[in-house]
Image (cartoon, helix red, strand yellow):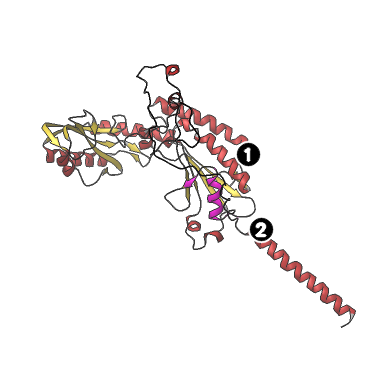
Amino acid sequence: MSNLQLSLAIIGGLVLALIVAYNTWTSRRNAPRKPSPVEPARTTEPLLRTEPALVGSIDVPLPGTPLDAMPAAAPVEPGAPHAVDLRDALELPVPPVAERRYPLDALLDALASLQVDGVVSGDAALAALPPTRRAGSKPYAVEGFNESTRQWEAPQPGQRYMAFQAGVQLANRIGALNEIEFSEFVMKTQAFADAIGAAADFPDMLQEVARARELDQFAVDHDAQLAFMLRARQAAWSPGYVQQQAARCGFVPGSIPGRLVLPASGQGLPPVLTLSYDTQAALSDDPEQSAIRELALSLDVPQVHRHEQPFARLREVAAALCAAMDGVLCDQNGTPLPAMAMDPIATDLELLYDQLDGRELSAGSLLARRLFS
């Protein structure tokens, strides 16, 4: 082999090696990012979850005792069960508790009163209820006035009721209550009243329909559902990588594949934020090979309590995810958003919160969650 042939062979080998190396580098660069290995377990002894137990005797303060006069907890020896200082316990913040589900309210419902001659059992009322809990597209409900608790509640077996009321919601995100839906509400309620031997008193249809349209117009003018996009700058993300990074910001898997939620501080309340991606990528046979280039970060403003600071948390989460995942925050059209573009939105939301409070439909309240659903 001549020197020329040898040189050409060497050059060809180098070119081939460079091509292979470039293709490998390109494929690795464009491959979806995968979650990092699980962090090693801590070497310290894990904390054991135990039921609270009484150790020794405890002096329980009487109602009205000054906070400074309460006894402090005695010193605890190492390894002994943890004792809580009563003064510290009283200062702990109490998270909001979800309200009971869907009580009827004259602000949001058209109500019909049902008067009975005697007392009706909860079992009889349950047997007489209509099979569906909707009148058209509007929620429909019946409540009874409990003889023992003297409160309105959904009929319960084993209870006794002195009166009943039925209601249909005036408006929701589908629209306002119309004449056909009101007529269906009347028929359902009258059938229930006949079954329990009650006399029904219905409101005026035209007045309730007009009230529904006014409430629906208010809801349309004050509804706010914010949605932003997080787009990958270069390499795409795998579902596992998205879940790992979102978990570091407090997100947990939702009930739908490809949906992650940031829980509220109280039980039974809607999530503060929602992070979602392609459902097909989440259901793929090999999710780690699925390429995700866009995430949707959304906030349903009327559904979340104001004190949760949802928009401030949205900005924090967006900034953290963009920094960790090499992404960029965009609007729904894919246009990048500078940080200063978020300030006017925050100002508008404060005004919206004030307007909802003035209408007794505070964001996150049960009435607001019903209206904006």
Of the numbered discs in the image, which one, if any, rests on residue 29? 2
Q: Is residue 241 magenta?
A: yes
Callout 1: few (<14), some (14-19), or many (20+) C-alpha neighbours within 10 Å?
Answer: few
Give the residue at x 68% y 64%: 24
Which span is picked out in magenta?
234-252
**Mark 1 or 2, nearer chain start:** 2
Residue 232 versus residue 347 in the image, above or below = below
Given residues 345 and 5, the one toward you in this image is 5
Q: Amino acid at mark 1?
A: Pro
The residue lying furthest to the bottom in this view is: 1
Question: In the image, residue 120 lies at what x, y percent?
Answer: 13, 35
Callouts 1 and 2 close, C-beta under 8 Å: no
Q: Is residue 187 magenta?
A: no
Question: In the image, residue 239 lies at what x, y percent?
Answer: 53, 54
Q: Secondary structure at mark 2?
A: helix
Q: Is residue 113 left or right of residue 317?
A: left
Residue 191 appears in the rendering: no
Question: In the image, residue 94 lies at what x, y percent?
Answer: 42, 30
Question: In the image, residue 18 lies at what x, y percent?
Answer: 76, 67
Q: Amino acid at mark 2?
A: Arg
Q: Quadrant of the C terminus?
A: top left
Callout 2: few (<14), some (14-19), or many (20+) C-alpha neighbours within 10 Å?
Answer: few
Residue 97 appears in the rendering: yes
Given residues 17 and 112, the one toward you in this image is 17
Residue 206 versus residue 324 in the image, above or below = above
Q: Quadrant of residue 143?
A: top left
Q: Residue tagged by mark 1? A: 338
